[in-house]
Structures are given as structure tokens and as C-alpha cells.
Image (spheres, rainbow, N blue to C red):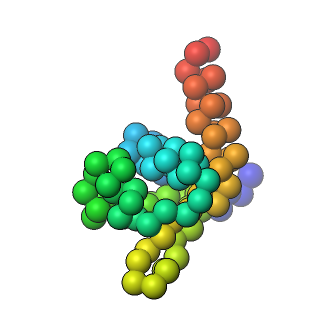
Amino acid sequence: MSEEVFKDAAKVFYALSSVARLRILSLLEATRRPLHIKAVSRSLKIDYATVYRHIRTLESAGLVEIYDVGRSRVVEVKDPNTVRELVEKAGLLKQR
């Protein structure tokens, strides 16, 4: 594998290494629709600025997409099945 592949994988694993980011992904996956970042913040009872930083990390890893709707920022999971599969796989590895 190339160095670039390892770097991309490291970004994904880093993004998934936070319980808060996993909670954000879980919420986005459960709603199955884009959410305003403020709604994510309120739902998870986490400060908006903190949620936004976590979402930027997830975006950098290619797990979510952020876009503007009017004056608001909206976020959605790029591929909910991938996120669910990665989390399930981690749980299986822990059981071994």
C-alpha cells in the first residue's frame, strides 16, 4: 500500500477515535437526513463551537459533508453504511 493510503486511513481512524464524534455520526445516521450544526449541538448537549470542530475533523476524514443553507451550516453523513460497518467491526475486534 502507498503512503497516501496510510495517511488517509490514519485520518479516518483519528476521526473515529472520539466518543463525541462517534455520537455525532450516530445522530446523523439515525436521522437519515442533513441536520443544522446547531441542531446537532442542541441534541447532544455539546457547545456549538466544540461540535463544529468535531464536524470539521469528520469532514477532513471524508466521513461527512458540510454545506451552507441560507445563513446556516448543515452536515450530513456521506455514507451511513460505512460508518456503521466501521463501528461494528471495532466492536468485534474488541471481543476477540
Q: Quadrant of the C terminus?
A: top right
Name the residue at 49% across, 58% down.
58
How many numbered markers are drawn? 0
Residue in view at x 40 percent, y 56 percent: 40
Q: Residue at x 25, y 57 (%)?
A: 47
Image: 73 above or below 45: below
Where does the image place residue 9, in percent across and percent down from the top left? 61, 51
Query: Furthest-bottom residue in view?
Result: 70
Q: Please name whichever residue, 6 or 78, is drawn nearer the observer in this view of the structure.
A: 78
Horizontal side, residue 52 vs residue 89: left or right:
left
- Relative placement, left or right, of 43 versus 83 is left
Residue that extends furthest to the right in the rendered view of this protein = 1
Horizontal side, residue 53 vs residue 1: left or right: left
Instruction: Identify which residue is drawn at 43% across, 74% down.
Output: 73
| Residue 95: percent from left, percent from top | 58, 15
Task: Please indicate, yes or no, whether residue 73 appears anywhere in the rendered image.
Answer: yes
Residue 10 shown left or right of residue 48 in the figure: right
Q: Is residue 6 in view?
A: no
